[in-house]
Image (spheres, grey):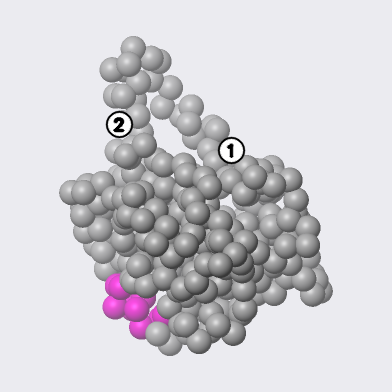
Amino acid sequence: MNNFLNEVNKGERFEFGKNWNRFLKVLDEERISEAENSLKAMLCVESLANKSFLDVGSGSGLFSLAARRLGARVHSFDYDPYSATCTNEIKQRFFPSDNHWTVGQGDVLDIDYLKSLGRFDVVYAWGVLHHTGAMWQALENVKILVAPKGQLFISIYNDQGDASKRWLRLKRYYSQSPEPLRITIVVSVGLFFAIRSILKRIVRFQSPQPFKNLAKYKKNRGMSYWTDLIDWVGGYPFEVARPEEVFAFFHAGRYELIKLITCGGDIGCNQFVFNRKEDGNE
C-alpha cells in the first residue's frame, strides 16, 4: 500500500481503482453478459465449470464476476488497493460468502506472492502487464501461474512507434498534473478521437455519425467509453509491444498461440490466447 501511494504522489502511477469505482455505478446485467460472451469467445468455451481462473490485475472485478458466473473457481488480485476494493465490492454484490471466489491485493512482479497462489487452468491479464513498469518481467512471471494444458489470455498495448512515444509523454504529463487539468486533457483527447472518426468516415464517403460507435460501446466487453478513455489517457506506467514480439516470447517458453486479435496497427491492445503445453517449463 505504501509503495503504491508513494508512486501515485510522485506522479509515477495512475490510480486505476478510483477510475473503476466510477464504472461500478453503471455496471448492469447487459455489461456482465457481454463480458461473459467475450470470455467464451476468446477461450473457445461455453462454460468454465470445474476450472480455476486467476484474474491478474482484476480492476473493476467485472471479468472475475464473468468467470465465476461461468462456473470457475476464481482468485482475483490487483496491485492497486482501490481496484482490489472494487473487485471485492462486486463479489459482495453478486457472490457474498462464496468460498469459490477470493480477492486479494498483490503484485505480479512479486514472484514469492505468485508462487503462493499455485497454478490455474485459466490465467487472465487483460490490459494489465504493460502498466506494471516492467512489462517483460511481468510476462515472464505469469508463466509460472499457468497449469499444464492451461490457457493464458493476455492483452498488450500495440507498439505504434513514434505514436506510442507520444502517448507515453501524454500519460506521464497527465499523472503529474493537478485534477482540474486532468479533466481538460481527457476531454481534449476524446474530442480528438471524435474528430478523427468523423474525418475518416468522410474520406470513405460515409455519413459522419460521430456517436455511432459510442452507442455500441457497451458491446465492447461490457465496458464504458468514458472509463476506458480516462484509462487510455492516464494509464501510467505504459509499455508496448509488437504482436510478433509477444508471440516469440511465449513460443520460446513452449506456449502455443491459439487465438490472436490485433488492433490493426492502430491504438489499442492486441489480444492473445496461449495454451501451455503439458511439458512446458519456465
Q: Nearer the viewer, residue 23 or 96?
A: 96
Q: Secondary structure at mark 1?
A: helix
At label 1, the amino acid type is Lys
- Name the residue located 59 percent from the left edge and 38 percent from the top edge: 219
Q: Nearer the viewer, residue 154 or 193?
A: 154
* Image coordinates for residue 117, horizontal then vertical, percent: 61, 80
Stretch of the chain drawn in magenta: 4-14
Q: Quadrant of residue 8?
A: bottom left
- Name the residue located 36 percent from the left edge and 67 percent from the top edge: 135
- Name the residue located 32 percent from the left edge and 54 percent from the top edge: 245
CB under 8 Å between discs 1 and 2:
no
At label 2, the amino acid type is Arg
> Mark on residue 196?
2
Give the label, 1 or 2, closer to the camera: 1
Q: Is residue 227 left or right of residue 85?
A: left
* Image coordinates for residue 5, horizontal then vertical, percent: 41, 81
Q: Quadrant of residue 196?
A: top left
Of pointers 1 and 2, the one earlier in the residue sequence: 2
The answer to whether residue 3 shows anywhere in this view is yes
- Name the residue located 34 percent from the left edge and 71 percent from the top edge: 134
Q: Is residue 135 left or right of residue 227?
A: left
Q: Nearer the viewer, residue 92 or 104?
A: 104
* The residue positioned farthest toward the front in the image shown: 279
Q: Is residue 47 left or right of residue 184?
A: right
Residue 44 higher or lower than 92, as above or below: above
The answer to whether residue 92 shows anywhere in this view is no
- Distance of mark 1 from mark 2, alpha carbons? 21 Å
Q: Return the residue at label 1.
A: 219
Q: Is residue 65 magenta?
A: no
